[in-house]
Amino acid sequence: MKTEDVLALFELPFSELVYRAQTVHRGHFDPDRVQLSSLLSVKTGGCPEDCAYCPQSRRHATDVDDEPLLPLAEVLAAAQAAKAGGATRFCMGAAWRSPKARDLEGILPMIAGVKALGMETCATLGMLRPGQAESLREAGLDYYNHNLDTSPEFYGQIITTREYRDRLDTLERVRAAGLRVCCGGIVGMGESRRDRAALIAQLAGLDPYPESVPINDLVAVPGTPLADAAPLDPLEFVRTVAATRIAMPRAWVRISAGRERMSEAVQALCFLAGANSVFRGSKLLTTGNPEAARDSEMFDRLGMKPVAPVS
Ligand code: SAM
Ligand code: DTB
Ligand code: SF4
């Protein structure tokens, strides 16, 4: 799908767009099921990259400190708790530009340990060098998260320390190693509707397209260059979800960051527009997320059920 085609979806009357997205969604998924992933930051802060949205960049004066890698036992305890709370996938995040060989050595036992709990495993560790995706796969990794974040045209206004091409190279390595791809982006950073459409066209143009597509609504964190970004119109967020669903019919589309200040009515519209995954638990990496009990209540009210655990 070309950018112009995705843009044409955005321009449809709202009810027509949501109707089309829901129709596509029903062709591939049970519309009443939601997939739950939990996140843990296993290496927080001190990142050398300059991503304008990110509280973990050491270039921004935020409250996030540079911390060492978490101990294995702490990670496994968090995964166990996430599983008990209903999550089927556990995603481990590290604030690295790119893991060094010894960084990866610390991560591999975490992946193997989480996998042994009977959960799907996901990691987001930055750019990968040749061979690293294969090591992750051998340790038991199912998914690698690496976002394109925005359009190629807007990218330079958000990140200057790496290029779009670098992200695509890592995504190719992840694919070639036989891992499943989790790749999406952020909206609400001051990008245009065309940029949102171009991001979706890029994601849909990956061959094959990602199995999992997180759509993050910017969490504007004090101290980051985007701290004062104007919030995106919630209906434009729903349109973004709908266009993502239509462009990638079989992907798990996740409403990722930004749910804490999103009304349940808007979230319900997102589910109607084809979203079928969220993060479970009160914390994302460094910022907040709705409490699990509150989400469970919302799903009950919507008649939605979590997808069954993998084992
Ligand atoms: N360092 C690795 C990388 O950049 O790929 C992994 C961790 S990074 C925090 C993962 C993703 O979180 C980013 O690609 C971005 O999409 C999302 N993210 C980070 N800060 C965010 C924020 N303030 N609001 C919304 N999404 C955010
Ligand atoms: C993704 O697309 N969103 C998640 C996950 N992948 C790693 C991260 C959201 C981070 C939000 C800001 C924070 O909590 O630090
Ligand atoms: Fe570092 Fe990832 Fe944050 Fe960018 S998004 S500053 S690479 S942790």
Image: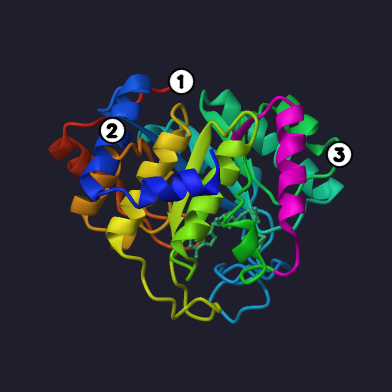
Q: Residues within 10 Å of mark 3 (few under 14, many from 20)?
A: few
| Residue 292 visible at all | yes
Distance from Cα at disc 3 to Cα at disc 2: 39 Å
* Residue 141 located left or right of residue 103: left
Q: First in sequence, mark 3 or 2: give its number.
A: 2
Q: Residue furthest left?
A: 301
Position above or below: 138 against 145 = above
User: Disc 2 designates what residue?
Assistant: 22
Position above or below: 147 against 115 = below
* Kind of residue at badge 3: Pro
Residue under the image location 77 percent in, 36 percent down: 173
Comparing 40 with 217, the one in front is 217
Comparing 133 with 18, the one in front is 18
Distance from Cα at disc 3 to Cα at disc 1: 30 Å
Q: Residue furthest top?
A: 311
Write down the quadrant of residue 159 in the picture: bottom right
How far from the left and from the top, in percent, is residue 91?
55, 41
* Kind of residue at badge 2: Gln
User: Disc 1 designates what residue?
Assistant: 310
* Residue 154 located left or right of residue 137: left
- Region in magenta: 160-183
Comparing 227 with 38, the one in front is 227
How far from the left and from the top, in percent, is residue 70?
63, 52
How far from the left and from the top, in percent, is residue 179?
67, 28
Residue under the image location 25 percent in, 28 percent down: 32
User: Disc 3 designates what residue?
Assistant: 130
Say which of marks 3 and 1 sits in front. 3
Q: How many marks?
A: 3
